[in-house]
Amino acid sequence: MTKAYCAIAALVSGLLAGPAAALDLTMPGPVAAQESRQEPAATYILPTGPITDGQLPHRRLEGALDQRAWVLDARGVSSLELLQPLRAELVAQGFQIIFECETHGCGGFDFRFTVDVMPEPAMHVDLGDFRFLSAEKGDEAVTLLVSRSPAFGFVQLTRLGALPLPPPAPLNTDLPELPIATEPAAPPEGPTTPVVAPEPPQVAGDLAATLRAQGSVVLEDLVFASGAAALEPGDYPSLLSLAAWLAESPENSVLLVGHTDSSGALKANVDLSKRRAEGVRQALLALPGVKAGQVRAEGVGPLAPRASNLTEEGRQKNRRVEAVMASGQ
């Protein structure tokens, strides 16, 4: 997916064109970035009530899926102010609201990690401030999810129905012929310069800034033994940076969220992800200046993948611990 950046308020027209009429929504602020995904045939769980005792009231729908997410330059705009004009436009276009909720009324953490959300940075959900609604018109259903970070507003719209999707790009068959190597090239004469492996990305210096800008960051440098919850011994730049951020301002706090791939049983994966998040929490608390009340740990198992679980590379990306800013500056 690609990002389209612009610096002006955008009228998003022809957003999800159906056979009868377009669904036009005007974003309540200048659009900084936009991403989308489409599936011609998908199954979608439409929430119809808040999650209670781990159960989400829903309808199981099938059809063409069109999902869009916008990042808005909306400093000082509340999540309610983001949602209100979008809700009004849906109603004006004939959609009937069937469920609407706000943060804890939705079910809080459990609701956020049960509904379908596009991955960061396309869509960010502050676990302490998000709003959701679902609506329907005829055989079409839509959901709206809005949230915000200190600097930006986030809007995700999902539509399911008998929608025509753009045709795939034509296959380019006019490819140049590649030269065929008949023998390996001779090594260059004279002294050679040893190849130096590039240094790994410096997570520590960027972590606090990423937390402030996006509201969450994956702790990419953590290493767990296979099937184990405790971190392998060693120094982790991401934890040192996170600990410094927590220590410098006691009002800062984070939620550590553990994730797994989809291999194995759901309950076991959720349990492992929570134990790994708790293992990271204990490692943080062992660092100077970090207070117990500043760090919480949860686990969602495979419920929030950031890559496909069909490949080993994707499964490795999905096995992670993410720091979500609960409060701070």
Image (cartoon, helix red, strand yellow):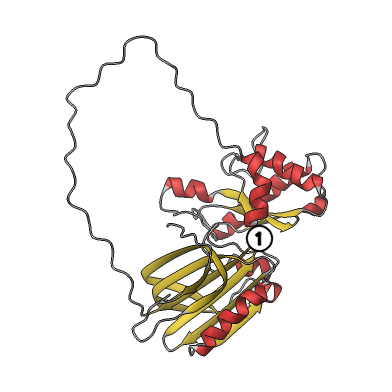
Task: Examine the rendered structure and indicate whether residue 43 appears above or below residue 208.
Answer: below
Is residue 261 in sight in this rendering?
Answer: yes
Q: Residue at x 57, y 82 (%)?
A: 87
The residue labelled by disc 1 is 151
In the shown orientation, is residue 269 left or right of residue 173?
A: right
Q: Position of residue 315 (x, y in %)?
A: 48, 49
Task: Examine the rendered structure and indicate whether residue 298 appears above or below residue 280.
Answer: below
Q: Position of residue 253 (x, y in %)?
A: 76, 54
Q: Residue at x 68, y 72 (%)?
A: 78
Q: Quadrant of residue 325?
A: bottom right
In the shown orientation, is residue 67 left or right of residue 50?
A: left
Q: Foreground: 73 or 179?
A: 73
Q: Quadrant of the C terminus?
A: bottom right
Q: Position of residue 234 (x, y in %)?
A: 67, 32
Q: Foreground: 111 or 81?
A: 81
In the shown orientation, is residue 31 left or right of residue 38?
A: right
What amino acid is at disc 1? Ala
In the shown orientation, is residue 22 left or right of residue 73?
A: left
Classed neighbour count for the residue bearing mark 1: other residues with Cα under 10 Å, few (<14), some (14–19), many (≥20): some
Is residue 49 in sight in this rendering?
Answer: no
Q: Quadrant of residue 49?
A: bottom right
Q: Residue at x 56, y 41 (%)?
A: 226
Q: Position of residue 239 (x, y in %)?
A: 69, 41
Q: Foreground: 186 or 305?
A: 186
Residue at the outermost front position? 8
Q: Quadrant of the N terminus?
A: bottom left
User: Tag 1's secondary structure?
Assistant: loop
Q: Residue at x 40, y 14 (%)?
A: 192
